Image (cartoon, rainbow, N blue to C red):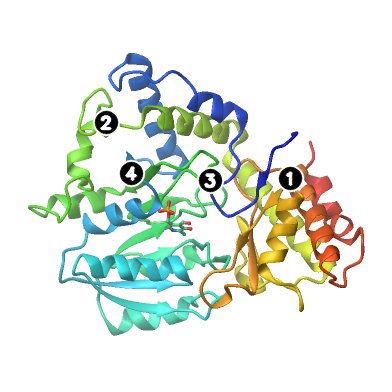
Amino acid sequence: MIDQTLTMIPGPTPVHPRILEALARPTVSHLAPEFVEAFRAAIADFRWLCQSREGQPFIVAGGGTLAMEIGLVNVVEPGERILVVSQGYFGDRYAELAGAFGIEADVVRSEWGRAVAPEELAVRLAAGSYAAVTITHVDTSTGTAAPAAAYCELLRGRRELVILDGVCATGGIDEPCDTWGVDVLVTAPQKAIGAPPGLALCLFSPRAMARRRERRSVPAYYADVLRWLPIMEDPGRYYSTPCVNEVFAFGQALRMVRAEGMSTRVARHSGLAGAVRAGLEALGVPLFTAPDCRADTLSVALLPPGVEDAPFRKAMAARGIVVAGGLGPISGKAFRLGHMGNIGPAEVAATLIALEGSLLSLGAAVTPGAAVAGAASHLAALQR
Ligand SMILES: Cc1ncc(COP(=O)(O)O)c(C=O)c1O
């Protein structure tokens, strides 16, 4: 597309024109029948996306961090203790968030770029009891995918509620909430779901709803799920004005996920991730994340020797591609590349070509043509 920059950061991700059309619909009353119907469908489709039969969706204006807050303050009391499984910046955020509400947090932390082994979690669980355990499905700072199914297996039948942060996973990586026994899924639309930012998305299991109902009050007003429940059951009612256009857009994105089918979508994300990794490898650009825990939604790679962060991202931008810098300990040393949501083989190929050109322009020792050649078999398998 002429003059169009390709935003290949790990969120927000590029939004498909059909979703943008939905966003641009005339803003109608939140009580207008067409909006109420769209909201009802989005709630049902979000429950479908979470692979849940009885989970209670909550779709409210906000972002992923608000979803994290809703997911915690409704089920854990100030003074109670949680266990945070952290694989980076966003895992640590859960401990910080808990602290803001007087909730104690123990943290089991991996080295950056690695995942916490299920055995380590088992040791922590054997040593103490917690009100909840938070898990970041994919930590966007490190590109680490947690062994979430294995963690959930360890937590099965225990009193700890499982709170899963799916912000960088939902819609791109399999996340069967009922099968895994997830009590609260917290997520957002702007990454693998491929809708614009602006919503906090949660799914509460019956057990999590019961935990909320046991409590007389929570230290929240907007974030209290019991205030939102009547609206989720009947979107024709009012609590706080929903972001009408964003719900239209989110609903359209969900229809596209349903049309693609979750298994096809998961396979597409896996194929794109394979293409990116093969392309990087062919260029001699090392991935930061350990091979056994690389996420299919983004890749974190180390800048080659002699290549500085700012000129590299400038060279990419000059070629029409925006990538993100490293966070925390890898700030200035790595870049983060999103490949999720509405992205396809064409966008990945364009990104690899820009990557190769940028590195060559900065004097890195890369072989012209190597990136796309390295990724070719993965990309070809994805073309319809
Ligand atoms: C894994 C994860 N959790 C939570 C968040 C916070 O979401 P938001 O920026 O929408 O508040 C992010 C944002 O990138 C994230 O990647």
Q: CA distance from mark 2 to mark 1?
A: 36 Å
List x then y, in percent, for residue 18. Answer: 59, 26
Left or right: where 351 falls relative to 59: right
Element type where label 3 sits in the image: loop
Label 4 Cα crowd, 10 Å radius (few <14 / some 14-19 / many 20+): many
Element type where label 1 sits in the image: helix
Q: Which mark is residue 241?
A: 2
Q: Which mark is residue 303?
A: none
Q: Quadrant of the C terminus?
A: top right
Q: Which of these two is toward me, 116 or 8?
A: 8
Q: Residue at x 40, y 43 (%)?
A: 52
List x then y, in percent, for residue 228. Answer: 22, 38
Report the amino acid beneath label 1. Answer: Glu
Element type where label 4 sits in the image: loop
Report the amino acid beneath label 3. Answer: Gly
Q: What residue did someone put label 4 on?
A: 55
Report the amino acid beneath label 4. Answer: Gly
